[in-house]
Each structure stands twice: as structure tokens, then as C-alpha cells.
């Protein structure tokens, strides 16, 4: 079976055995995610959203069901095949940033290129610089993570996710450790990347962050219980402008 969706799963189950019991992390999940989508995945802890993300990110395998990525059947592929497919098509962004602490922003972003391509050193340098410039870190390329704010560290992780030109970014609570304004700055980057054609699939428990997507799904007890198009979508650029105006009112000197 082939599909025109970028990601297509049919009747997906993930079952864990605990003694004689079977624990269903996913129960009969079916969904198509189109290329260019910006999808928010929501639901309480233990609802199945992270299990679903791990499976579509090729970090885990379903117990049964179908999974097609860009028309390729991923069921039954080897670990090496999945690793190569993941490397070439998927960028990951995590809540905890997952940066190497003793390595500069530049070197953190360069790492996927070292492992995944035969690019020359000058070509790698150019790609890394362009990724860091794209997330607003032109002046912070050679800083260590402990010299960067939380928002800047997340920008580094986004640059690392996009340096291989992925088809999709999977973001797991990307604003979970950030304040409201910094969260919107990160979401602005995601919305810009989405406008450039990258598909975004984002787990979040924050209602306002969920409103920045184009569509959302809600998991409960391993099932998708709700699929919804976002009607009143929040645009991060406009939200940040509101923050700026509020700050100017509180501190008129900022306008001088």
C-alpha cells in the first residue's frame, strides 16, 4: 500500500508485556501527516504521544500496524536502514536540548554532518554557519552551552536538527524549559521553517503553544480521541510584537 502523505500510519499498536498482562501504549492509531503540515500532539502524561513520536521518528518499532514515510514502507526494515533513513530525513528537537556540554555551538551542529556525509570541511563549515545564522546565532557560534541562555541552547539544537535539510522536524516539548517570551521566539523559528516547507510535528502540553500549530491531535489511553484544525492560530511574530509593546509601556526608556 502506498500513500501520498509524508507520514502515514494505519492501525498502529504498541504493546508491552508485564508478566501475564499486556499494556497498550498505542491502540489502533491511524493518521496521515501531509508534507508541509505543522501538527501539535497533545495529551496527558502516559497518553501515548511520546510512544507515537518515537515510532514515527524510527527510534522504536510498533508491535503491529503499517507505517509509511514518504511512500517507503518502514515495517520490517533493519536497524541500519532505519538509522540511515532517520539521519537523512528527520531532525529532532528535545526539551532538554541534548547538547554536548564541552563542545561549542558550532561543533554541536556540525556533528550530524561528520557522521552522515562526505562533505568537505569547507562545505560542512558553510552548512553549519548557515544553520546557526538561520536561528539567529551568528554571534554565538563558538560559545559553549553553559555560556548560552536556555533559549539560545534550544536554537543550537534546532540548528543541529535542520543542518541535514530534513523533511520533518520532530519536537518533543521544545518549549518545556523556557519562559513565555523565549518560547514564542522558538516557535517563531518553527513557523518560519514550516513556511519554508519543513513539516513540523510537535508534542506540547501547553495550550498556547498548541495554538501555534496548523492542526492538533489529542491522545488519551493510547488512542487519538480528537483531531482538530486550529481556527484561532497564534502567530509567534505577532505575539512577540505584543510582548515588545508591553515592555515598552512598563519601561518607557526602552523606546528612547
Image (tube, rainbow, N blue to C red):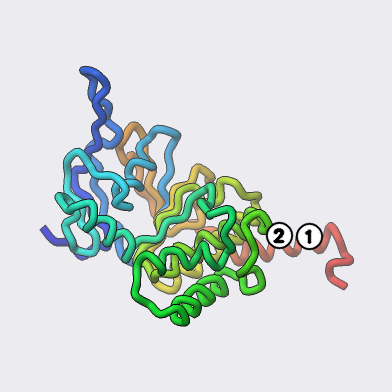
Residue 122, compared with residue 108, is above or below; it is below
- Residue farthest along the left direction in this orientation: 1
Residue 181 visible in image: no
In the image, taking residue 24 as reference, residue 119 lies left or right, namely right
Per the rendering, the mark at residue 247 is: 1
Residue found at x 33% / y 52%:
57
Mark 1 surroundings: few (<14), some (14-19) or many (≥20) residues within 10 A: some
In which quadrant will I find the C terminus? Answer: bottom right
| Secondary structure category for the residue under label 2 | helix
Residue found at x 60% / y 66%:
237
In the image, taking residue 96 as reference, residue 230 lies left or right, namely left
Residue found at x 24% / y 44%:
61
Pinpoint residue 42: horizontal percent, then vertical percent: 43, 43
In the image, taking residue 63 as reference, residue 203 lies left or right, namely right
| Secondary structure category for the residue under label 1 | helix
Front-lying residue, 158 or 45: 158
Residue 27, compared with residue 113, is above or below; it is above
Residue found at x 65% / y 64%:
143
Pinpoint residue 60: horizontal percent, then vertical percent: 29, 45
Residue located beneath label 2 in the image: 243
Label 1 – label 2 distance at C-alpha: 6 Å
Residue 19, compared with residue 63, is above or below; it is above
In which quadrant will I find the N terminus? Answer: bottom left
Total of numbered circles in the picture?
A: 2
Mark 2 surroundings: few (<14), some (14-19) or many (≥20) residues within 10 A: some
Residue 11, compared with residue 159, is above or below; it is above
Pinpoint residue 188: horizontal percent, then vertical percent: 56, 64
Residue 48 visible in image: yes
Amino acid at each position: 500500500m502506498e500513500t501520498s502523505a509524508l507520514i502515514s500510519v494505519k492501525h498502529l499498536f504498541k504493546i508491552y508485556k508485564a508478566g501475564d498482562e499486556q499494556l497498550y501504549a498505542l491502540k489502533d492509531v491511524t493518521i496521515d501527516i501531509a508534507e508541509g503540515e505543522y501538527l501539535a500532539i497533545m495529551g496527558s502524561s502516559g497518553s501515548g504521544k511520546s510512544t507515537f513520536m518515537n515510532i514515527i521518528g524510527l527510534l522504536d518499532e510498533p508491535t503491529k500496524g503499517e507505517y509509511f514515510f514518504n511512500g517507503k514502507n518502514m515495517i520490517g526494515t533493519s536497524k541500519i536502514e532505519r538509522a540511515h533513513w532517520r539521519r537523512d530525513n528527520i531532525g529532532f528537537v528535545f526539551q532538554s536540548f541534548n547538547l554536548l556540554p564541552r563542545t561549542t555551538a558550532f561543533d554541536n551542529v556540525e556533528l550530524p554532518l561528520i557522521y552522515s556525509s562526505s562533505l568537505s570541511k569547507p562545505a560542512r563549515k558553510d552548512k553549519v554557519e548557515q544553520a546557526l545564522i538561520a536561528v539567529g546565532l551568528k554571534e554565538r557560534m563558538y560559545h559553549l552551552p553553559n555560556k548560552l541562555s536556555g533559549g539560545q541552547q534550544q536554537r543550537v539544537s534546532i540548528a543541529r536538527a535542520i543542518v541535514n535539510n530534513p523533511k520533518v522536524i520532530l519536537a518533543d516539548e521544545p518549549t518545556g524549559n523556557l519562559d513565555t517570551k523565549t518560547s514564542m521566539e522558538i516557535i517563531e523559528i518553527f513557523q518560519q521553517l514550516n513556511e519554508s516547507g519543513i513539516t513540523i510535528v510537535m508534542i506540547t502540553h501547553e495550550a498556547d503553544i498548541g495554538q501555534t500549530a496548523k492542526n492538533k491531535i489529542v491522545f488519551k489511553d493510547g488512542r487519538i480521541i480528537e483531531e482538530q484544525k486550529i481556527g484561532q492560530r497564534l502567530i509567534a511574530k505577532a505575539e512577540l510584537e505584543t510582548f515588545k509593546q508591553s515592555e515598552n509601556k512598563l519601561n518607557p526608556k526602552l523606546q528612547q
